[in-house]
Image (cartoon, rainbow, N blue to C red):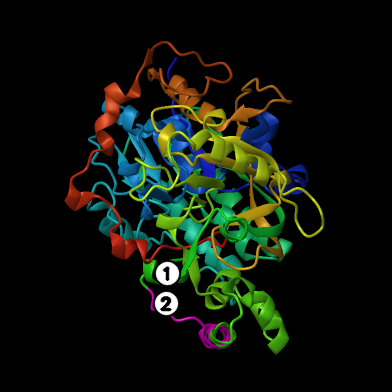
Amino acid sequence: MAQKAILIGLDGLDPSEISPWLDDHSLNNLSSLVTTGGQSELSSTHPPWTPCAWPSLLSGRNPGAHGVFDFFMNREYNKELIDRPAVDAPYLFETAAEVEQTPIVINYPITHPTPEIEHGAVVPGYLATEDAEFSPPELRDEYESEYGEYRIYPSYGTNDDPVTEYTDVARHRRDMARFLDERYDWDLMAVQFQVTDSIFHDLDDRDQIRQVLENIDEFVGDIINLGRDDPLVLVASDHGMGDYEWTFYINSWLAENGYCETTAGEEQYFRQAKDELKGESGQKQTSGIVSAVGTAASGLSAVGLSPRRIHQGLGAIGLDKTVERLLPEDALVAAQNQVVDHENSTAYQLLFNSLGVHLNVEGREANGQVSPEDYDDVRDELINDLSQVRDPDGNLVFDDVLPREEVYEGKHLNDAPDIVLVPRDYQYDVSGSIVDTFRRYPHKNHKPEGILISNRDLDVDPEAGASIYDIAPTVAAALGLPVDSETDGEVLGPFEADEQVDWDEIAGEYREVSDSESGPTDDVEDRLADLGYME
């Protein structure tokens, strides 16, 4: 029998990071759900990044099917920031709206520009601009007249009172749920909290992290209470979070090993534009220090020091500790002046941190260097070489280096990187910057196993866990919707798929928007906000 469903997304929560607080009931509402139903690991996409994982959770399809592998799309040698039309798959809530159910969707990433659904409401989340339009359009003004300004983004790196900052942003998700609950007789209430990811990137104090999570746990309980009539409740994270030890600069390695050419120039980096996306001035307190680092780097370059070695060279003039103390992206961008010369390279990591290498193939890229006849040989050689890369401690960097067809499947397979990288134990960032090949950089970043909590026994194999692709078909079955025949997941627990239909036949038009509505422009790409894990 069809029932209401509440789908709560907690970005980046890792079972190992929060298990002590679940066990001692610091996170009381989540603990109660575990007691009532259960919890399991939830495997993410590869890579386990926000922009490909949430579309997979909402569609039930792998990146090879929906076409998003990173924060950007590959457009020849250029990058184009993704938005909703870039995701080539219908979302769960769009399918629900098309069969005249009423979804309420709050803050989910990659839902902008918001679709015009006849039933329900959509408030966009991560990667939308701070002033993005809601659906219906009058919704923002109506909400803000009652609750105050709705913010998509917190002030990252806030030092004054981070617990209050992150809690205030999260509170608007709860308040918006209450606001919309009064106006709609909804079937699906889907609310996402992005700051549960941000706090692990941004805060070192475990007590502050716990305080933010306790407040969000309270908001989760308030949202669940809106359900009445015992709805299905699923709480899911898009990936996990844990310790990283190194940054491996793969384009530097490719350059040193003859695969990649470099040239002088400026590159666009994620963190550089975060303030403009939020409508702020973009001035940083560290700008003077960064300028000093840049000046020193220019001097070192002028006397013949290779830009890839400038970061090391800064130590000779006493600026190496400054480089390490600053936000890594700011200092390292200032300390180098080389970028990839894509057109004249054999291979490169095109996107910021895509965990993948593209080959520059004749007939596919505008100035391809690898003939189709040589493609397999070049790729096999590079896979072999990368499989043997070791960090300065002598440890292998990658658990696997794979051809893309062993990782993805679907109509967008050819849009995937030619080579897919699986870092050893996910302890390595793999950056496309051109600096020294390795840098020891202990920090928190994404892990491939997130968490799934429900008020129902979903009968998940405790060893295998569940998959992020299982969420959409499970919620669809609970709602009484047709389950997508093209899903890469399965229906969990006591629910059954009464009917299977290709969701493209039901709701495929939602990704088709006119040029005037087509999401971020080049200016928005230049204002993109970083959560702290991209260079």
Q: In the figure, residue 64 lies in which quadrant?
A: top left
Q: Residues within 10 Å of mark 1 (few under 14, many from 20)?
A: many
Q: Are marks 2 and 1 in contact (CB under 8 Å)?
A: yes
Residue 420 location, x and y as percent? 57, 40
Task: Establish if 22 lies above or below 496.
Answer: below
Q: Position of residue 515 (x, y in %)?
A: 18, 49
Q: Tell me which residue sits at (59%, 36%) in the image.
A: 380
- What kind of secondary structure does the magenta stretch mostly adopt? helix
Of residue 8 and residue 69, the one placed in the foreground of this image is: 69
Residue 46 visible (yes or no): no
Classify the position of the C terminus by image quarter: bottom right
Q: Position of residue 526 (x, y in %)?
A: 36, 66
Residue 32 in the image: above or below residue 175: above
Question: Circle 1 — which element?
Answer: helix
**Amino acid type indicated by mark 2:** Gly
Judge whether 321 appears above or below 254 on screen: below
Identify residue for label 2: 282
Magenta highlight range: 280-297
Residue at far top of view: 498
Task: Say which element carries label 2.
Answer: loop
Q: In the image, 200: left or right of 179? A: right
- Asked which quadrant contains residue 341, the reply is bottom left
Of label 2 and label 1, which has the lower sequence position? 1
- Residue 331 painted magenta: no
User: Which disc, if any, is residue 273?
Assistant: 1
Q: Label 1 sits on what residue type? A: Ala
Residue 413: x percent and y percent?
44, 32
The stretch drawn in magenta includes residue 295: yes
